[in-house]
Image (cartoon, rainbow, N blue to C red):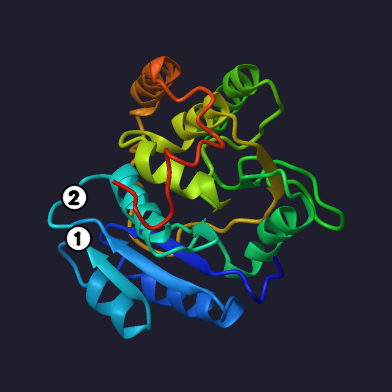
Amino acid sequence: MSEGKRRILCIIPAYNEEEAVVQVVRELREHLPQADVLVVDDGSFDRTAERARAAGALVCSLAFNLGIGAAVQTGLKYAARNGYDVAIQVDGDGQHPAEEIPPLLEVLEKNSEVDVVIGSRFLPSPGRPVQDGFKSTGTRRIGIRIFAAAISVICRQRLTDTTSGFRATRGEAIGFLGRFYPRDYPEVEALVLLHQAGYVIRETPVVMRERQGGASSIRLGHGLYYMIKVFMAVALGLLKETKGLKGDPTTFPRRALD
């Protein structure tokens, strides 16, 4: 299906991102005018929802702060129920430039077998250097590499940026993630669930920016705790009954996701 005919939804999970969300929405509308933009306001107590709506986005406001996993899952459920062909996850803090979305879509366009594309900071791209740990702490860089090594073994393919939330998902995989998307530490565990179910994952190089406002939910000094929690979530994910679900038309009917 050509890019002009695909129904595309950009999902922006946002918690207290009033400083950056307007620019994120405007950039998406400028660089991807054929797409709809949905901001999932994760129980913010600032003006995130108000400012996103004024910028032209659809807004879904959660009653309480449920976390990044629940916010993304809400967006994926909306995409599945409304028949979108591609769902693109974009952070609400401005780290994911809208002009980097075309490489994600290009992978889907050229590779019909691919279900999910991850934007990776750590893959080389012609004409620009690899952003290996761009302006992040040494501890965080080590953690990212440990996650990448472990998930590469589990998924039996080389993955370099397993914590990246810059992703494009299409077709049946949207419904799958709408049902099974993890609530805690979701980026890493979701890859395991997708692999277990039989979906095809690819990476493509992208450039990311520093956050344009707000504060990260992962605080300095919590790195080891975070890593332990992620690996526990991955271990539990391996026990979930998702193996071989890809291609079962009775499991993820479009527009009728529970």
Task: From this view, report whether residue 36 is shown above or below residue 151.
Answer: below
Badge 2 element: loop
The amino acid type found where label 2 is placed reads Asn
Q: From the top left corner, tell me how far across and down residue 192 is, in percent.
A: 51, 26
Residue named by callout 2: 65
The amino acid type found where label 1 is placed reads Ser
Q: With 183 as the anchor, is 134 left or right in this view?
A: right
The answer to which image quadrant residue 108 occupies is bottom right
Residue named by callout 1: 44
Q: From the top left corner, tell me how far across and down residue 83 is, in percent.
A: 45, 63
Q: With 38 as the anchor, is 3 left or right in this view?
A: right
Residue at image coords 68%, 43%: 203
The residue carrying pointer 2 sits among few (fewer than 14), some (14 to 19) or many (20 or more) residues within 10 Å by Cα, namely some
Residue 116 in view (yes/no): yes
Which label is found at residue 21?
A: none
The residue carrying pointer 1 sits among few (fewer than 14), some (14 to 19) or many (20 or more) residues within 10 Å by Cα, namely some
Badge 1 element: loop
Q: From the top left corner, tell me how far across and down residue 221 is, in percent.
A: 34, 29
Q: Earlier in the sequence, mark 1 or mark 2?
A: 1
Residue at image coords 60%, 77%: 31
Q: From the top left corner, tell me how far across and down residue 155 is, in percent.
A: 62, 23
In front of the other: 255 or 149:
255
Residue 93 in view (yes/no): no
Task: Count all numbered tags in the image, as a single digit.
Answer: 2
Q: Are marks 1 and 2 in contact (CB under 8 Å)?
A: yes
